[in-house]
């Protein structure tokens, strides 16, 4: 496999991904980022999954979003009115 590598990121063409997926996944597991290209243009990335957040962290994020939303109401504006105001 001969690919362009920048730091911990390697650029791999789609044909090579098909032939070497198992090897590429092992490299991703070790922390490398694989950018999949088609005709030289990036189309996807293989990366390690991020750490999952606990149920308590998710619940707290939802609570904070709802708190902010409760303080920021539309005050009777319709979507059409907001769009019209945004175009001024």
Image: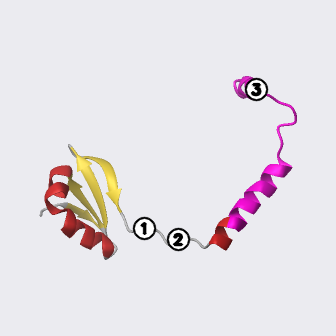
Q: Which residue is mark 3?
A: 85
**Which region shows up in magenta?**
59-88
Q: Residues within 10 Å of mark 1 (few under 14, many from 20)?
A: few
Judged by depth in the image, the label closer to the viewer, 3 or 2, is 2
Q: Quadrant of residue 38?
A: top left
Residue drawn at the location 83% of the way across and 50% of the way down: 70
Q: Residues within 10 Å of mark 2 (few under 14, many from 20)?
A: few
The image shows residue 3 at horizontal and vertical percentages of 17, 60
Mark 2: which secondary structure? loop
The N terminus, quarter of image: bottom left
2 and 1 marks in contact (CB < 8 Å)? yes
Mark 1: which secondary structure? loop
Q: How many marks?
A: 3
The C terminus, quarter of image: top right
Q: Front-most of 35 and 6?
A: 35
From the image, give the main secondary structure of the stretch colored magenta.
helix
3 and 2 marks in contact (CB < 8 Å)? no
> Is residue 39 toward the left or the right of residue 28 in the image?
left
Q: Quadrant of residue 73?
A: top right
């Amino acid at each position: 496999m001969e690919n362009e590598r920048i730091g911990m990121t390697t650029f791999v063409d789609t044909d090579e991904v098909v032939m070497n997926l198992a090897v590429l996944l092992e490299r991703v597991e070790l922390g490398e980022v694989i950018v999949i290209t088609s005709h030289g243009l990036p189309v996807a990335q293989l990366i390690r999954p991020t750490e999952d957040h606990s149920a308590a962290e998710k619940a707290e994020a939802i609570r904070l979003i709802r708190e902010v939303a409760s303080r920021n109401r539309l005050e009777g504006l319709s979507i059409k009115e907001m769009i019209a105001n945004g175009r001024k």
